[in-house]
Image (cartoon, rainbow, N blue to C red):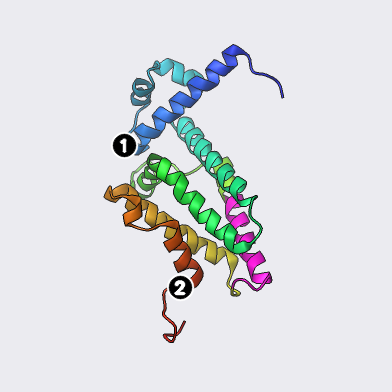
């Protein structure tokens, strides 16, 4: 691997500082209301310098989302690589997601703004790179459930549908954390979500 020069390291550091500042501004204002000037003020760089590194506000947004998505997926994949059992993989994936968004709540807020905004400009959406990254992530989770079905660990349900349910459950819990201001432990723990997903909520003798 080629070692970066001092100037390249400095540029990479400045780029990350700008992205982290953008995360705060986009979380507070939403994509359409946020300005590059506000990002520049928070990052303590000039607007011109930001435009030297990013083509536009949308480019800045896309790179922020891809940076955090890459960090998240790398963390999940690394944790999953240490597990062999499908049930443990599911538990690991749930715990990893909740851990990540406990640390990066502002990043989750950005997606809430994306879903809530109804502007003439239309939704900002995701970059093609990020869409492909997310598609591969969802496919990996589906493969875990499919493997569990083949092993007789899980009942024979469509893996993609199970993954969608798991994502919906975890997203709802994170949204509650973020928007209620409550402590994470007051809402749900990874263990509670795992229990509901893997065992359901019906007591024995009630159609379960």
SS state under label 1: helix
Which numbered disc covers residue 200? 2
**Dot 1 alpha-carbon crowd within 10 angstroms: few under 14, some 14 to 19, many 20 or more:** some
**Dot 2 alpha-carbon crowd within 10 angstroms: few under 14, some 14 to 19, many 20 or more:** few
The residue drawn where x is 45% and y is 50% is 98
The residue drawn where x is 35% and y is 28% is 35
Camera-near label (2 vs 1) is: 2
Pointer 2 or 1: first along the chain: 1
Task: State the extent of the magenta-drawn residues as a range.
Answer: 135-154
SS state under label 2: loop
Asked if the magenta segment contains residue 150, the reply would be yes
Check if mark 2's residue and mark 1's residue have beta carbons within 8 Å. no
Q: Is residue 10 left or right of residue 181?
A: right
Q: Main secondary structure of the magenta part?
A: helix
Q: How far separated are the C-alphas under marks 2 and 1? A: 37 Å
Q: Nearer the viewer, residue 155 or 43?
A: 155
Which numbered disc covers residue 163? none
Residue 44 position in % (x across, y down): 37, 18
């Amino acid at each position: 691997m080629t070692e970066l020069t001092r100037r390249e390291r400095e540029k990479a550091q400045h780029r990350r500082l700008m992205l982290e500042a953008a995360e705060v501004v986009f979380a507070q204002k939403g994509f359409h209301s946020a300005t590059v000037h506000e990002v520049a003020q928070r990052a303590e760089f000039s607007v011109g310098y930001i435009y030297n590194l990013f083509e536009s506000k949308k480019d800045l947004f896309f790179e922020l989302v891809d940076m955090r998505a890459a960090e998240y997926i790398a963390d999940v994949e690394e944790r999953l690589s240490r597990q062999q059992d499908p049930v443990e993989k599911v538990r690991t994936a749930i715990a990893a997601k909740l851990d990540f968004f406990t640390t990066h709540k502002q990043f989750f807020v950005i997606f809430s703004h994306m879903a809530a905004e109804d502007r003439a400009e239309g939704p900002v959406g995701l970059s093609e790179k990020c869409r492909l990254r997310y598609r591969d992530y969802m496919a990996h989770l589906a493969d875990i459930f499919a493997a569990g079905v083949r092993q007789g660990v899980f009942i024979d349900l469509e893996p993609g549908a199970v993954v969608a349910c798991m994502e919906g459950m975890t997203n709802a819990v994170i949204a509650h954390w973020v928007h209620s201001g409550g402590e994470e432990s007051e809402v749900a723990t990874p263990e509670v979500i795992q229990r509901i997903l893997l065992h359901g909520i019906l007591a024995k003798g009630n159609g379960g």
